[in-house]
Image: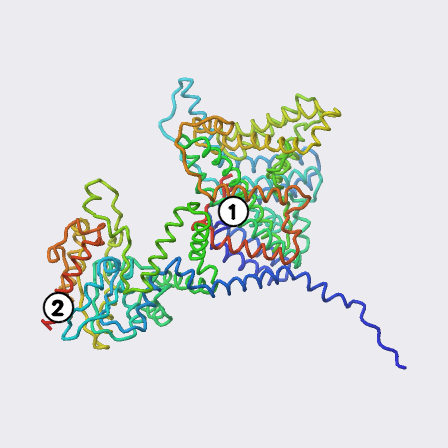
């Protein structure tokens, strides 16, 4: 018989070497598993920490809205779609109204939101414009992270060399965040955990629990409704009382270093989009408090001149929702720039009437 | 660049990758040196000359000491190195202190004082640490414990190695330079241990210390506004914060160094389970304590002379230790206080040597608990000295710590404060009472990796929004 070859002496070598990697391997697998669990429950985290821009865009996208109202926080806080429902626009009844107000946004964000969020042609597009939307001295970080696609990125990089570094940083950070679910949803997970702890031991983390409850309510309103989810604090607040009591007024830095340029170009893009899709576009000059206009008198002068130019030279339809026209005073504002519930109610009815007239004028 | 900042999380992998891609020894160390200097310059490029100058002087002094033909010359070159390091430290760290005190003294004596004031001098990053490393190197060469390093790059890497450059541990040349003979190859164990220490350090710093700071800062800023219970929690929270902040940095440094293949000495060994003040100083900032012992206390005579001289040496060493931590009377007093505590402990210890009843009592578990509690009470009392911003606040907190009341209002202590303090205590009990460097390292692989995943989860989800600077960076 032929002798069998003896087994290798170092047959335990491979397993022994592999065991050295066990901790590292288990750690990496654990991280991947954790990431999977986090992504599977993405909705849960979003409910606890709603991403305002993403939520509003998701709700708007793919649905047939008759009227979409674009704009920043003055629109988000001050335009109640329920009041505009039933409006007759050129013989068509407006039944479904969506408030696509993006707090802190500029005209660039509204343009990107329109391009990616309004996928079904509405009957009417209203842009509640204000001076701070056009200030090229500021950029909104949520824009690159939530609203822009690669094409938008390339266009911005080509057109706005002054803010290339900022844009790449914001866009890159957002892309990196999306690579790791745990990091992307960290705030939602934190608030969810606080919510659970608050259920087990009420009052242990009162501030976080209050934040969670507000967020969950806000998230539910955004997910169910027509985009109108004003902040509870703004609803009840009266700027007149804050002033009378000598209380601290939140600063409004969005008009600092006012200059026109690329954001204004996006207003023309919004117009081009409306023309392309055969949608009527109305610009509504949103009301601001008298104090804000007095503080930035030269900015508002320039802005109003621009609006007149857009109306006369470029054929934009503009409704001037200034305080006198609407009948607003400090009692109707929550702060320098946002309407409270009484202001929003009055402004909504004025807007409905003004749009009805504008429809007839057409 | 803060170790807990996003920029560092880009810097570190890039440097690690490039370092391990290079094969030649010289290339590796040159690259590591440039990276370390870059990190230093990222804080303030104008101060790069400080570390360059002291490195050049110490390197030259080391070689000249070794090649000197007479003891006088050897001593002369040693003095050059000492003067160079200490004068830099004195100029940057103590000029304001000396000026302010001399002005105050002049005013007290009724002498005229100038009508101009001295601008606050900015302290170069890590100067207290790298000057001490330089001093230990030249002293060791002078004493013949190590050979002088010929290559400037090798020596400069030892001084500027970025993981420990800013806040230690203070590495001895005799521990570090032999590791540099050939570029150390990183083993899997070092990668895993590096991950362990890096995560533990980050967890201590970001999850515990930075969160506790949110409670500690307002309490210590205005102690008069808080009741005694809140003040006591403030002291406990500060003790947990400073431990986690500093030992967290040391752990980060140890972890990073392991990824480059280097071993740094342990700097903290669960100091809050110490049974006496001398035990505490054997566990707290070990690299500084041992440096002071070897290069100050023992040269002063240590415990080899009379008892009185020993106590004098202890008090001088600890007072200078206080002064090293900060240029203010609070720190001087804190150092002196610790010197006194060490002396009293030594007196008591000597008196009880050989007494059977004392040995019996000391072996009881209840005694050990009591001894630890008493030690911590005095240690925390010392912390109040250096953390409070005025003497009235210091007195109020001391009264509260030792059971007195406070006229401030009762405040609700945030739930996270007791939870985080308890976490630090549990960590000490889990690992500090066993002969291990960290209890997690002794866990089975699955549980160990589970702990790391949990640490990552907690770090990412519960870290405060902005990373605070490490407390020991100011030293």
Residue B288 visible in the shown view: yes
Numbered disc 1: secondary structure: helix
**Residue B256 drawn above or below residue B335:** below
Q: Residue at x 72, y 65 (%)?
A: A15
The residue lying furthest to the right in this view is: A1
Residues flagged by tags 1 and 2 on a common chain? no
Q: Quadrant of residue B78?
A: top right
- Specify the quadrant that holds the N terminus of chain A: bottom right
Residue B385, percent across and down? 50, 30
**Residue B245 drawn above or below residue B229:** below
Q: Residues within 10 Å of mark 1 (few under 14, many from 20)?
A: many
Towards the viewer: A197 or B204:
A197
Residue B168, percent across and down? 57, 44
Q: Quadrant of residue B406?
A: top left
Marks 1 and 2: which is nearer the front?
A: 2
The numbered dot on residue B205 is 1
Residue A98, percent across and down? 25, 67
Q: CA distance from mark 1 to mark 2?
A: 61 Å
Numbered disc 2: secondary structure: helix
Does residue A324 appear to the left or right of A36 in the view shown? left
Residue B68, percent across and down? 69, 39
Residue picked out by circle 2: A356
Towards the viewer: B3 or B24:
B3
């Amino acid at each position: 018989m032929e002798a069998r070859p003896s087994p290798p002496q170092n047959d335990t070598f491979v397993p022994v070497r592999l065991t050295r990697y066990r901790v590292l391997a288990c750690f990496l697998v654990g991280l991947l598993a954790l990431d999977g669990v986090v992504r599977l429950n993405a909705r849960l985290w979003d409910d606890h920490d709603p991403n305002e821009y993403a939520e509003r865009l998701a709700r708007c996208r793919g649905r047939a809205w008759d009227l979409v109202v674009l704009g920043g926080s003055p629109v988000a806080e001050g335009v109640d779609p329920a009041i505009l429902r039933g409006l007759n626009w050129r013989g068509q009844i407006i039944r479904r109204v969506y408030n696509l107000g993006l707090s802190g946004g500029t005209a660039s964000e509204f343009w990107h939101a329109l391009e990616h969020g309004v996928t079904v042609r509405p009957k009417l597009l209203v842009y509640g414009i204000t001076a701070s939307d056009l200030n090229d001295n500021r950029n909104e970080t949520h824009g690159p992270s939530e609203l822009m696609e690669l094409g938008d990125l390339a266009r911005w990089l080509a057109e706005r060399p002054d803010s290339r570094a900022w844009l790449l940083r914001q866009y890159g950070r957002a892309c990196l965040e999306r690579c790791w679910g745990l990091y992307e949803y960290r705030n939602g997970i934190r608030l969810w955990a606080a919510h659970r702890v608050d259920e087990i031991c009420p009052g242990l983390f009162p501030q976080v629990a209050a934040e969670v409850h507000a967020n969950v309510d806000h998230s539910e309103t955004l997910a169910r409704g027509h985009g109108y989810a004003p902040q509870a604090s703004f609803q009840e607040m009266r700027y007149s009382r804050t002033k009378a009591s000598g209380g601290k007024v939140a600063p409004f830095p969005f008009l600092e270093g006012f200059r026109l340029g690329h954001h204004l170009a996006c207003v023309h893009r919004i117009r081009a989009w409306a023309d392309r899709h055969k949608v009527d576009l109305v610009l509504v000059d949103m009301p601001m408090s008298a104090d804000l206009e007095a503080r930035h008198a030269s900015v508002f002068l320039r802005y109003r001149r621009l609006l007149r130019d857009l109306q006369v030279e470029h054929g934009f339809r503009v409704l001037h929702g200034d305080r006198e026209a609407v009948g607003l005073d400090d009692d109707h504002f929550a702060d320098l720039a946002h309407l409270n519930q009484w202001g929003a109610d009055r402004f909504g009815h004025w807007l409905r009437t003004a749009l009805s007239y504008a429809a007839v004028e057409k | 660049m803060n170790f807990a900042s996003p920029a560092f999380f880009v810097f570190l992998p890039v440097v690690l990758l490039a370092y391990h891609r290079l094969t030649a020894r010289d290339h590796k160390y040159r690259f590591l040196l440039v990276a370390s200097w870059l990190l230093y310059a990222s804080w303030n490029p104008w101060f790069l000359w400080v570390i360059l100058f002291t490195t050049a002087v110490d390197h030259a002094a080391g070689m000249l000491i070794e090649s000197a033909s007479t003891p006088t010359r050897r001593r002369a070159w040693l003095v050059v190195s000492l003067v160079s390091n200490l004068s830099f430290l004195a100029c940057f760290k103590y000029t304001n202190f000396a000026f302010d005190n001399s002005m105050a003294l002049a005013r007290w004596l009724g002498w005229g004082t100038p009508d101009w004031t001295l601008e606050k001098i900015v302290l170069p990053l890590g100067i207290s640490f790298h000057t001490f490393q330089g001093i230990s190197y030249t002293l060791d060469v002078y004493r013949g414990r190590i050979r002088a390093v010929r290559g400037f790059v090798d020596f400069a890497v030892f001084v500027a190695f970025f993981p420990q450059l800013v806040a230690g541990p203070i590495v001895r040349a005799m521990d570090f330079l032999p590791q540099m003979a050939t570029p150390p190859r990183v083993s899997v164990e070092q990668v895993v241990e590096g991950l362990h220490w890096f995560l533990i350090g980050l967890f201590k710093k970001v999850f515990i210390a930075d969160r506790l700071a949110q409670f500690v800062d307002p309490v210590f800023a205005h102690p008069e506004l808080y009741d005694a219970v809140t003040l006591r929690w403030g002291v406990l929270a500060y003790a947990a914060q400073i431990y986690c902040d500093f030992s967290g940095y040391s752990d980060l440094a140890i972890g990073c160094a392991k990824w480059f293949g280097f071993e740094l000495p342990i700097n903290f060994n669960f100091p809050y389970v110490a049974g006496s003040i001398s035990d505490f100083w054997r566990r707290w900032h070990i690299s500084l304590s041992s440096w002071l012992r070897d290069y100050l206390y023992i040269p002063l005579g240590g415990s080899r002379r009379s008892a009185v001289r020993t106590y004098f040496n202890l008090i001088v060493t600890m007072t200078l230790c206080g002064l090293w931590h900060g240029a203010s009377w609070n720190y001087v007093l804190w150092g002196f206080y610790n010197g006194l505590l060490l002396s009293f402990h030594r007196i008591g210890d000597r008196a009880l040597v050989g007494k059977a009843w004392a040995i019996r009592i000391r072996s009881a578990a209840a005694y050990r608990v009591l001894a630890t509690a008493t030690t911590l009470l005095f240690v925390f009392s010392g912390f109040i000295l250096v953390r409070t911003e005025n003497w009235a606040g210091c007195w109020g907190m001391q009264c509260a710590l030792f059971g007195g009341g406070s006229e401030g209002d009762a405040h609700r202590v945030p739930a996270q404060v007791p939870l985080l303090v308890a976490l630090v205590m549990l960590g000490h009990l889990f690992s500090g009472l066993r002969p291990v460097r960290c209890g997690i390292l002794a866990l089975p692989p699955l549980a160990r990796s589970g702990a790391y995943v949990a640490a990552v989860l907690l770090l990412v989800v519960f870290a405060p929004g902005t990373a605070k600077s490490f407390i020991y960076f100011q030293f």
